[in-house]
Image (cartoon, helix red, strand yellow):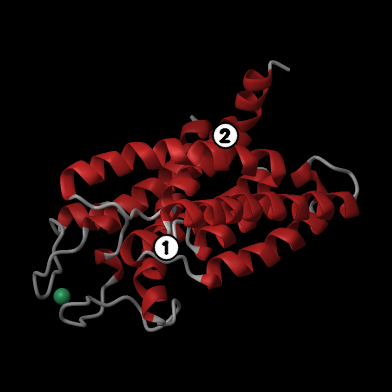
Amino acid sequence: MEEIILKIFIFVFGATIGSFLNVCIYRMPRKESIVKPPSHCPGCQHRINWYDNIPFLSFVFLRGRCRHCGQRISWRYFIVELISASIFLSLYLYFGISLRFWIFAAVSSSLIVASFIDIAIREIPDEISLWGIVIGLIVSVIFPQLHSSASRLTSLGLSFLGLLAGGGSIYITGIIGDAIFKKESMGGGDVKLMAMLGTFIGWKLVLLTFFLAPFFGAIFGIILKIKKGESFIPYGPFLSLAALISVFWGEKIIKWLFLI
Ligand SMILES: [Zn+2]
């Protein structure tokens, strides 16, 4: 019974964080502060009351419209809350309430924001990736167990190796892609995002991320190409999806691939 209550609590906690991530996704590309002013409707500027800001419920209750002016609220709000809640619950089921839970909850949150901003404006904000790199290196020194190491210096080294592997793999792909297609194929934002991921998950899992992402990207790219004739797709969401899969099943996948 207590276990179920804890799971529900983690799910709701994730949704609440998702609600804040929505604010970041909306405001960061507009260079607005993410802490103030309080949430308001982009249509009528009316302040959103707490009871209209409850994850999932408010969206359903208001039928996806602003209470005051009736403007449609984007489905993105609902989806981001649901993704965030599901990831938090999955992290709990895999790692329990542990160091890895908190660190990967924070990393996943920044991946959600980076992905949805990438979808909206085809750009990943430096505020996320560059600060993420700094925080990843610092966290690795403070908590060497993140890289399954007992020494802080070794952990920092592994984190830095992850940075090089993550950033380097995409950077080199970009250079090769540019030479073949004669146009920019990989954004600098992807390089920085992968460098950031590397500092947290290390070189093995970030390289696995690098190899997994194109599969999702290709499937989605083909669908988008057929439906809309669009050929340029944001890559951040696929890197993020691949990174999450690596966090959850990476060790198993690597063992299976190399039969060790
Ligand atoms: Zn409104």
Image side of residue 172 versus residue 117, left or right: right
Q: Nearer the viewer, residue 227 or 74?
A: 227
Classify mark 2: helix, strand or loop. Answer: helix
Query: Which residue does the image show at 52% across and 33% down from the upper left?
Result: 2
Q: Identity of the amino acid at label 1?
A: Leu
Classify mark 1: helix, strand or loop. Answer: helix
Residue 151 visible? The answer is yes
Q: How many marks?
A: 2
Q: Earlier in the sequence, mark 2 or mark 1?
A: 1
For the residue with label 1, is its CB less than 8 Å from the closest atom of ligand 1?
no
Q: Which residue is mark 1?
A: 21
Q: Which residue is mark 2?
A: 248
Q: Quadrant of ligand 1?
A: bottom left
Q: Position of residue 75 (x, y in %)?
A: 22, 55
Q: Position of residue 184 (x, y in %)?
A: 44, 61
Residue 9 visible? The answer is no
Quadrant, the C terminus: top right
Query: Which residue does the image show at 59% across and 54% down from the upper left?
Result: 194
Which of the numbered marks, if any, corresponds to residue 81? none
Most extreme residue toward the left, as rendered?
70
Distance from disc 2 to disc 1, alpha carbons, whole Å, reads: 22 Å
